[in-house]
Amino acid sequence: MIRLKLRKKLFCFDLDGVICKNINYKNSNLINYNKSKPIRSAVRAINKLYDDGHRIVIYTARGMTRYNGNISLVKKKLGNITTNSLKSWKLKYHKLVFGNIL
């Protein structure tokens, strides 16, 4: 029997709109991240990749507009909300990165 060893890969995913759906505050275009809901099919697919040994990185630009690109402030204001959401959704990942990708 021939066994192939598959190379482990790095997978990067955007959080909002890919892993979760967001809800705005009432009468506002600001997002209430406490009310974000997971997209279960995305969570299952990412967890499968993680379980298969691939590296998972989650990127998010959450708060970058609201806090004028100040990543330290974004992490202070939204870091716990975001990591707690990921935990409650049982999303498996290696790293969470705040900031604009481009």
Image (cartoon, helix red, strand yellow):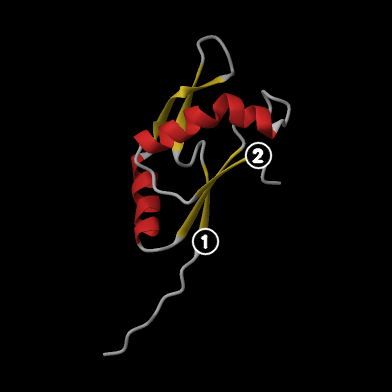
Q: Is residue 54 left or right of residue 61?
A: left
Secondary structure of the residue carrying tag 2 is loop
Across and down, in percent, residue 74 comes to 63, 29
- Percent position (x, y) of residue 57? 52, 51
- Which residue is the site of mark 2? 99
| Crowding near the residue tagged with mark 1, few <14, some 14–19, many ≥20 C-alpha atoms within 10 Å | few
At a point 43% along the width and 32% down the height, the residue shown is 84
How crowded pointer 2 is (Cα within 10 Å; few <14, some 14-19, many 20+) is rated as some
Q: Going by the picture, which residue comes out furthest to the bottom?
A: 1
Compare residues 7 and 28 and report the one nearer the observer: 7
Residue at image location 39% in from the left, 79% down from the top: 5
Residue 93 seen: yes
Using residue 100 as the reference point, say whether residue 97 is left or right of it: left
Report the residue that reaches farthest toward the top: 27
**Spatial separation of the CA atoms under disc 2 and disc 1:** 19 Å
Splitting the image into 4 quarters, where does residue 69 fall? top right
Which residue is rendered at x = 50% and y = 10% of the image? 26
Q: Amino acid at mark 1?
A: Leu
Q: In the displayed structure, would residue 6 be above or below residue 70? A: below
What residue is shown at x 73% (from left), y 26% (from top)? 68
Determine which of the numbered discs, if any, sits on residue 10 in the image.
1
Label annotation for residue 19: none
Which structural element holds mark 1?
A: strand
Q: Which badge, 2 or 1, is on the more N-terminal residue?
A: 1
Which residue is at the front of the view, 88 or 45?
Answer: 88
Where residue 33 appears, as percent x and y from the top left, is 49, 25
On the image, the x and y values in percent for residue 86 come to 42, 37
Q: Quadrant of residue 1?
A: bottom left
For this view, does 31 lie left or right of residue 51?
A: right
Q: How many discs appear?
A: 2
**Amino acid under disc 2:** Gly
Q: Is 66 placed above or below 54 here?
A: above
